[in-house]
Amino acid sequence: MAIVNVARFRDRRGRQGWLRLMAMLPALLVLSSGKILEANQKRPTRLIERAPAPKKIDYDKLTSEATALLSQEIRIDTTNPPGNELPVAKLLKEKFLADGIPATVWEPFPGRGVIAARLHGTGRHAAALVLLSHMDVVPANPKEWDVPPFSGEVKDGAIWGRGSIDDKGPGVIELMAMLAIKRAGLLLNRDIIFIATGDEEEGGRNGAGWVVTHEARVFADARYLLNEGGGITARPNGKRYFAVSIAEKTPLWLKLTAAGEEGHGAVPPAATAVTRLVAALDHIIAYRPPIRILDPVEEYYRDIGELDGGPAEFFHLKRALRDNPAFVRSFVAVPRQAALVRDTYTPTMLAGSPKTNVIPATATAEIDGRILPGDDPQADLDAIKKVIDDDSIKVDITLNFPAVSSPRKSVLMSAIDELAESEDVPVVPTMIAGFTDSHYFRQAGLIAYGFIPIELSPAEEKGVHGINEHLPVKQLDDGIRRMVELLETIGGH
Ligand SMILES: [Zn+2]
């Protein structure tokens, strides 16, 4: 079934444009003037004959190149901090230039790197698409890994190493898909812009944030963007779907500072900086922000209910979470679910005295707060202060930005829909509890989706920010094929 569908779509997409153009030409010429018609008869189809047919894409070659490139990238340790993405950016630039695709590298801060490349299409009529990825990675402790995390070793049909999935692998898929289109001689009706940044794992201010602030011209003609944050996945019953993230929660990171008299631990006063801080944290831990179900979340659970065949509450989540207390309890008992319907505040960093017998003058705690899109951060901050109920504690916001969601419908989503249809699986738009660099570009007006067309097993997903991260070569191959198909669709072929 799936194979038949793929064939049907390829055929339609590959020929439809030319057929339509050829069918229209005589009519257009007749309508214009007799003279042109005459000229046309002398050199009837010269233009069309001159256009070479697209070359066949050699996927085996692309995959072996992609495997080598990803290994090479992994061997450049880009643990953030400090990042050190510049050598990776240069490597990718060389890869683009070798195939005649213009590319540029910036060094926004010493050692940090950003690369952009542009595959030109006819460019004038349709807005460009950005393919975004990041080159920095989270730390890896070699002692915990079966394979050295910065070896890029190819073993058991997979490429092993930190960044193979998050996010160097996806960047390689995007890059190779652009090379494939270029080598095939396909002229898309829009430009495709590749951007790989650094610093994503530390919030992206020195990467994507820098690009949007300083080099926005690079994507000035773009309206769409694909990034990490979604992929192909399966329910426990085996039913597959394309998870495309269209919305993200936004951070409201807080720093609490409590003050008090310093002194000796042997003669403690009734309240100290530490005891005040602990009481404040106690209140925050007990705080349950109100439940609020956003449209994308309600729609997500309806889709999941359909794939799973229930439970009935998933088909009317708003109502169930309002009227059914037993369901509410079971629903929010799953952290992943609770995070999608309410704000969360999690204490993560603590600092007090450096010595057991010294009462410090200040004690601090940092809270990883995550708020739902559309929340007013100032109102949330006021609510937290009320919860803390101690005016002597200072509360500062250390990270926050506006949460902008992307619409469910767009040219890009239609292309993803078509790709999913060719594999006979549904598209399920999602909201993610974390955040990616997409928000920088959403704020700049782009429609951004989290979707990398690879299918990972739960075990493979555990490698992301975990141990033994590895990407199966087959996923690299499938990912490039799907990305090429997606680009062809959105590029009008
Ligand atoms: Zn990532």
Image: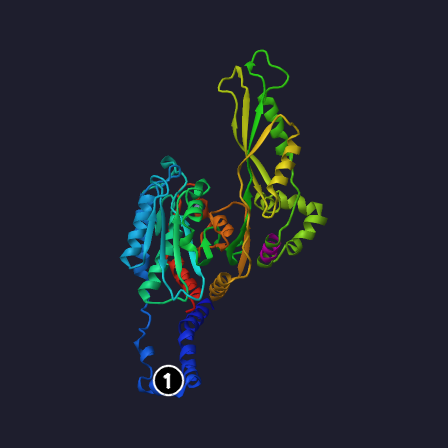
Pick the quarter of the image with the C terminus: bottom left
Left or right: residue 167 compared with residue 261: left
Question: What amino acid is labelled 1 in the image?
Answer: Ile
Q: Position of residue 409 (x, y in %)?
A: 55, 61
- The one of 7 and 340 positioned closer to us in this rendering: 340
Q: Nearer the viewer, residue 141 or 125?
A: 125
Q: Is residue 57 left or right of residue 335?
A: left
Q: Residue 472, percent across and down?
A: 38, 52
Residue placed farthest to the top in the image?
Answer: 267
Residue 129, position as x, y percentages in the image: 43, 59
The residue positioned 40% from the left and 49% from the top of the image is 215
Mark 1 sits near ligand 1, with its Cβ under 8 Å away: no
User: Which residue occupies 52% across, 58% down?
Assistant: 239
Total labels drawn: 1
Q: State the SS at label 1.
A: helix
Q: How is the image coloured?
A: rainbow
Find the residue positioned furthest to the right: 323
Residues 465 and 238: in front is 465
Q: Is residue 68 magenta?
A: no
In the rendered image, the vertical position of residue 108 relative to residue 46, given as above or below: above
Q: Which residues are magenta?
A: 297-304
Quadrant for residue 58, please give it. bottom left
Examine the image and state in which quarter residue 266 appears: top right
Name the outermost residue toward the left: 98
Asked if one can make out residue 166 in the rendered structure from this viewpoint, the answer is no
Which residue is at 31% across, 84% downward? 43
Check disc 1: other Cα within 10 Å, few if <14, some if 14-19, many if 20+.
Answer: some
- Residue for badge 1: 36
Which secondary structure dominates the residues rendered in magenta? Answer: helix
| Observer able to see residue 292 | yes
